[in-house]
């Protein structure tokens, strides 16, 4: 795709989300018009959940929810963990993980991640449980920017310790295919397969799925009687229409994302100081590009890139624990998280990233790194 001179001189934004085009959504909207069913688990939502469940082994239940944060919170509530108990979670995550834990009446316990994987190590966490500042009633490993987790190791952790596990795979749509641990995926507009807003729980636990469904719809379970304190977190038929169109386009979109990622990796080949997440753009894909820079170089590099018209973002800031909202929550020493917070930045990336834009990113990074 060729760009005009004005476009070439414009700022290069860090993210350029893209949802399905109106023409691909229209057939689903026409179905809504014909059915006159707009919410409350209509035919489009039912189809969306069925198609999502087909990405997992037979017997998997998929429950859609208004957004990924609500999916996490309602699943934690449905797990019926002791109120006020600690939930071990990485400090290296988006703030939504901690907000969901608090919303569920539980307490986040921030634990450090492995610096190579950017995620919690189940064996290391198991060894720390006896030193926790209170009863640990759950654990939430987070897929870092979509990188797959070792779910077999987390199942072993659950079996060995007896601690329930909920997987936060908000950005992990591409590789999410195992529901033997309850797993939450986001359908936000910024994700590789989005519906604007939304998220879903995938689980092989039929009872857990039924509880989350009830919690998302006023506590109803087959009647108009509200059986438990709950909320309204349903997806509308209109959101389901966008989600279905996203699924229609996913096979082709995945290839486009992979191609853009591989082109960017090739474009930055001459910059060994810039390290991609292992497997990104080859084994798995997500909608953002996070790279690791030399220690203590990120601030200067970001300032230089900004001056050159190339935007960046610290998607997780210095870590979830650094937000004022969580200042008083318990935490382990977070040395690896602190180092990652000072080294990891998000570069411009999108499904339609062009060769010219990759050239700009590479040139700007080369100039920025020459000064550090």
Image: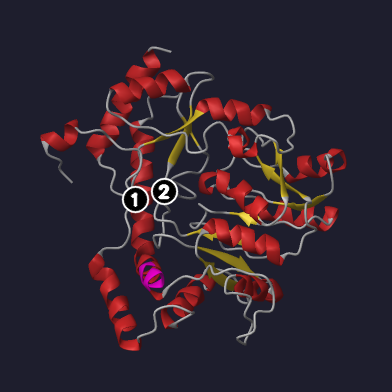
Please report the residue visible at 68 percent of the width from the left and 60 percent of the height from the top: 76
> Which color scheme is applied?
secondary structure
Q: Are marks 1 and 2 in contact (CB under 8 Å)?
A: yes
How crowded pointer 2 is (Cα within 10 Å; few <14, some 14-19, many 20+) is rated as many
Q: Position of residue 97 (x, y in %)?
A: 60, 49
How crowded pointer 1 is (Cα within 10 Å; few <14, some 14-19, many 20+) is rated as some
Please report the residue visible at 32 percent of the width from the left and 46 percent of the height from the top: 16
Q: Residue furthest left?
A: 5
Please report the residue visible at 78 percent of the width from the left and 52 percent of the height from the top: 84
User: On the image, which quarter does residue 214 sit in?
Assistant: bottom right
User: On the image, which quarter does residue 223 sit in?
Assistant: bottom right
**Of callouts 1 and 2, which one flags the residue occurring earlier in the amino acid sequence?**
1
Q: Say if residue 353 shows up in the picture.
A: yes
Please report the residue visible at 52 percent of the width from the left and 33 percent of the height from the top: 317
Tell me if 143 is positioned left or right of 163 in this view: left
Q: Position of residue 359 (x, y in %)?
A: 27, 31
Q: Which residue is mark 2?
A: 287
Q: Which residue is mark 1?
A: 17
Q: Which mark is residue 235?
A: none
Tell me if 216 is positioned left or right of 305 in this view: right
User: Of helix, strand and loop, which mostly describes the magenta segment?
Assistant: helix
Is residue 296 covered in magenta? no
Residue situated in front as seen by the camera: 134 or 218:
218
Is residue 240 covered in magenta? yes
What range of the chain is rendered magenta?
238-242
Spatial separation of the CA atoms under disc 1 and disc 2: 8 Å
Position above or below: 319 against 180: above
Residue situated in front as seen by the camera: 176 or 183:
183
Q: Position of residue 243 (x, y in %)?
A: 40, 67
Q: Say if residue 142 shows up in the picture.
A: no
Q: Position of residue 159 (x, y in %)?
A: 81, 58
């Amino acid at each position: 795709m060729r760009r005009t001179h004005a476009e070439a001189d414009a700022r290069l934004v860090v993210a350029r989300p893209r949802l399905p085009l109106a023409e691909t959504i229209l057939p689903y909207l026409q179905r809504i018009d014909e059915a006159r069913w707009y919410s409350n688990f209509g035919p489009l939502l039912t189809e969306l959940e069925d198609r999502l469940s087909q990405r997992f082994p037979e017997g998997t239940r998929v429950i859609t929810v208004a957004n990924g944060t609500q999916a996490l919170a309602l699943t934690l509530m449905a797990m019926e963990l002791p109120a006020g108990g600690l939930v071990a979670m990485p400090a290296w995550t988006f703030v939504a993980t901690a907000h969901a834990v608090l919303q569920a009446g539980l307490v986040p316990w921030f634990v450090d991640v492995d610096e190579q994987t950017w995620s919690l190590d189940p064996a290391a966490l198991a060894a720390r449980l006896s030193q926790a500042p209170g009863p640990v009633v759950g654990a939430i490993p987070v897929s870092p920017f979509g990188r797959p987790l070792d779910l077999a190791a987390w199942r072993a952790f659950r079996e060995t310790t007896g601690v329930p596990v909920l997987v936060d795979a908000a950005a992990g749509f591409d590789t999410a295919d195992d529901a033997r641990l309850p797993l939450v995926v986001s359908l936000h507009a910024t994700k590789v397969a989005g519906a604007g807003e939304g998220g879903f729980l995938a689980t092989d636990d039929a009872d857990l799925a039924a509880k989350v469904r009830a919690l998302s719809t006023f506590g109803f379970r087959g009647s108009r009687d509200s059986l438990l304190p709950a909320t309204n977190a349903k997806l509308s038929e209109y959101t389901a229409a966008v989600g279905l169109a996203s699924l229609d386009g996913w096979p082709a979109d995945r290839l486009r994302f992979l191609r853009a990622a591989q082109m960017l990796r090739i474009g930055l080949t001459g910059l060994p100081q810039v390290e991609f997440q292992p497997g990104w753009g080859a084994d798995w894909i997500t909608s953002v590009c996070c790279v690791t820079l030399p220690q203590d170089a990120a601030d200067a590099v970001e300032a230089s890139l900004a001056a050159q018209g190339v935007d960046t973002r610290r998607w997780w800031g210095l870590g979830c624990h650094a937000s004022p909202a969580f200042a008083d929550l318990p935490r382990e020493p977070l040395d690896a998280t602190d180092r990652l917070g000072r080294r990891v930045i998000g570069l411009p990336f999108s499904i339609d990233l062009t060769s010219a834009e990759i050239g700009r990113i590479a040139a700007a990074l080369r100039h920025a790194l020459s000064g550090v």
